[in-house]
Amino acid sequence: MFESLSDRLQNVFQKLGSKGMLTEADVREGMKQVRLALLEADVNYKVVKDFVAKVTEQAVGEEVMKSLTPDQQVVKIVHQELINLLGETHVPLVEARPGPTILMLVGLQGTGKTTLAAKLALHLRKNGKRVLLVACDVYRPAAITQLQALGKQLGIPVYSEGTQARPPDIARNALEHARKELFNTVIIDTAGRLQIDEPLMEELQQIDHMVAVNERLLVVDAMTGQEAVRVAEAFNERINLTGLVMTKMDGDARGGAALSVRAVTGVPIKFLSTGEKIDTHTLEPFHPDRLASRILGMGDVLSLIERAEQLYDAEQAKQMQKKLSKGKFDFEDFLNAMQQMRKLGPLQQIIGMIPGLSQMMRGHEEMISEKEMKRIEAMIFSMTPYERRHPEIIKGRRRERIANGSGTSLQEVTALIKQFQQTQRMMKQLTGGGGKGKGKGKGGRGGGGQIDPNELMRMLR
């Protein structure tokens, strides 16, 4: 969502960096471009005005102007002010003691509340919580059916009394059920409207009063721009929100709502959601410093590491270490590495988390698309198990058979094998070509630049 804004800001800082020593006029011109970039991203005008004023005041200071790297000092100031704008620190969900903790999801119709309820339940279960979903949207029968289907898919119980009961009564009965069955977290999916109205607000207040809600989370569609900010203000005035969840963060809108809503309402953003798929990477806790780094093209390595740790398989890593220590790397390993990478999330999203990589790959998106990955997988799956484990035997007729079986051309299969051979050579160099008969060199490494496999795995992690 922030790709366009990120590109604009990085261009501004590159121009400042190319000037060497900066004058006050240079900084003010750069801040003018930053202001335009933020306004085009649909950030609230008052928020932009205050942001640029704060950055300019610090950036034209004597300490910055006389610095050996004034452009980097300006980037540092912008980065810190973005963090301040987004909320400074991560605000986790409240945990009631004694429980259960009650979360109520509110928002307008079409923002993705029901899908978000399932994502949040999955996230909390992975963190050791026993979660009960509660269907309180009785005005749209499909909402109850959808929540039950998602609950069944995830193996998470859903409490429902159909469409005839009053939502406050459903919430009260669900809480009693949760206490009896020892659920420690209850997520209430409430009704939405196409617009804010009095009956909607009264119903939410009644539910809150009936069960003493711990978290009142507004689900906001990030693609609606400044309208999302106005909705957040209206809900906050009536039910005292404790947090915001921004959905559809992978959309093609300008994304200014995410940069405005915290500053305007004072309510912390607690989660970011992408897409409709229910899995571990489509909902992530909101960290202001990490989003600020992504916007400025600095990546988000911490979030990437957290995702990788969730998928980390110690036994599989040991097997890979053994193979690498012997200088072995085949198409089975190549395929496994691809599949593990795809588990981390959409490739474009992963690339955005690696500092500088999104800029490097600009204009080469086809090389990292899901379509390209599936094409490579098709070629590997068209190989026999023996061919995957012994790539050196894949010659003329075998290549033709693989091309026919995968719906690709002979040239594409040949290109894949060349790409694999380069990767294979790199792996052999990292492990010293198998290490046979090679003694330890400086720093505990074998001859030919051999690296201890445990060290290699630490580097990769």
Image (cartoon, rainbow, N blue to C red):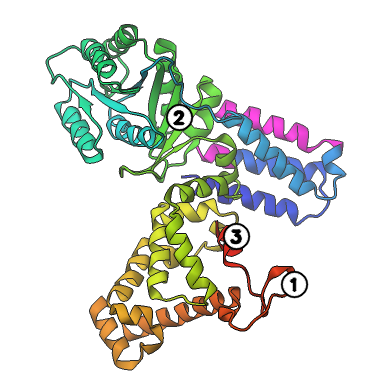
Task: Check residue 226 in the rendering and tell me which mark sits there, or answer none.
Answer: 2
**Residues at circles 2 and 3 in contact by the CB criterion of under 8 Å:** no
Q: Which amino acid does label 2 sit on?
A: Gln
Of marks 1 and 3, which one's residue comes earlier in the chain? Answer: 1
For disc 3, the marked residue is: 459
Q: Under tag 2, what secondary structure?
A: helix
- How many numbered circles does the render carry? 3
Q: Tell whether position 56 is magenta.
A: yes
Q: Is the residue 411 above or below the residue 198 in the image? A: below
Task: Check residue 442 in the rendering and tell me which mark sits there, or answer none.
Answer: 1
Residue 173, position as x, y percentages in the image: 22, 13
Q: Under tag 1, what secondary structure?
A: helix
> CA gap, disc 1 to disc 3?
18 Å
Task: Estimate how packed mark 2 is, as few (under 14), some (14 to 19) or many (20 or more) residues with alpha carbons within 10 Å.
Answer: many
Q: Which of marks 1 and 3 is in front?
A: 1
Residue 252, position as x, y percentages in the image: 41, 46
Q: Which amino acid does label 1 sit on?
A: Lys
**Left or right for 89, reference 27:** left
Looking at the image, which is closer to me, 364 or 242? 242
Q: Give the residues in magenta.
A: 37-62
Question: Residue drawn at (41%, 78%), measured in percent from left and top?
Answer: 416
Q: Which amino acid does label 3 sit on?
A: Met
